[in-house]
Image: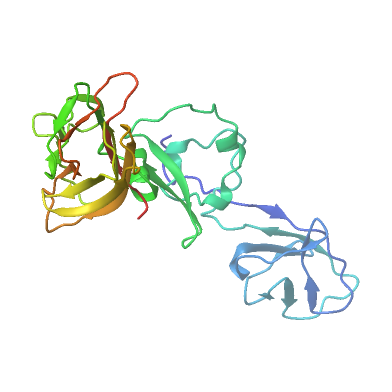
Amino acid sequence: MSYIGRTPQIGAYHKLDSITCDGSTAYTMQLDSANFVPESVNHLIVSVNGVIQAPTDSFTVSGSTITFASALSSSDTIDFIMALGNVLDIGVPSDNTVSSSKIIDGAISSSKLATTSITGQTAETSANDSDSLLIYDDSATALRKMTRANFLTGVGGSNTPAFMVRKTPNQSVSGATSTLVTFNSEIVDSDGRFDTSTSRFTPTETGYYYLFAQVNIQAIHDQATTELDIKKNGSFIASRFKHIALNSSSDREPSIFTSCIIDVDDTAPDDYFEVFIYTDFGSGTTITGSSNPIYTSFGGFKLIGV
């Protein structure tokens, strides 16, 4: 609103409680029976016996005590004391008159937030990566916001890349030869890191991985030794399980399993992993393939938090 001339000043204006003179120079100022401390001596209008008193010359102020230049007898009358308050003070706003645009960004601390401002809202059942989440920072004793994507990166994540593949056709294995086990059918391959044409898993992401393999092998006996390996880059044996058949001429079809936790570090992000089988059974044997049930499989996933 515009004004002609000087803009009116607003503030906390009060008429203080009546004071009875008793021959003293000093008196306690009160507002509604509570001690009152003005902004300064110049914020008071004081009338004694119908005469306005000059601040500093006729009276001074210290805290809630007003001291007159000369003692006031019991016949003197302090007509009134008006406290002007802080003339720059806007006073107490009326209810529902302060809009959010009047509040400085970041001015409201978490201690001023009502719990219902969060708990009273509709509960969400999902969140997008770009959505902001509220977290409490213990070190700063303050609320912080973070996107869902950054939150998951900071406290956890997903166990990917992850894969599991199976063999559906049978595969012949020569005796006394380390043979690559081939896998032709993907059950899951979250990031496309398994290549069925080479039967290799290439994570391309650093970290620790849990890998496992199972092979069902047919018709071995007479204490034949069978070794199931998970190999890194075709040579390093990350895991090996050794099986020795019974001393019997009867055929056996054992399912053998091996697993490991292995690190893919920054120096070799292109490490790859394969499954090999070896048997010293002289005439060779066969790996069982099937889609249901799954006899022969290879899988793994990235570990988080390690």
> Residue 54, how many percent across, how many down?
64, 70
Q: Is residue 258 left or right of residue 174?
A: right
| Nearer to the camera, 170 or 186 | 170
Q: Quadrant of the C terminus?
A: bottom left
Q: Is residue 135 above or below residue 43?
A: above
Q: How many numbered dots are placed on residues in this image?
A: 0
> Residue 187, how many percent across, how many down?
27, 25
> Residue 88, how many percent across, how many down?
51, 54
**Residue at point 60%, 65% (across, down):** 39
Residue 112 appears in the picture as rendered: yes
| Nearer to the camera, 262 or 244 | 244
> Residue 290, how many percent across, how many down?
27, 21
Q: Quadrant of residue 178?
A: top left
Q: In this figure, which colouring scheme has been used for the structure?
A: rainbow
Q: Is residue 225 above or below residue 69?
A: above
Q: Quadrant of the N terminus?
A: top left
| Nearer to the camera, 185 or 120 | 185
Q: Quadrant of residue 76?
A: bottom right
Q: Residue furthest front?
A: 249
Residue 208 appears in the picture as rendered: no
**Residue at point 22%, 26% (across, down):** 167
Q: Is residue 140 left or right of residue 33?
A: left
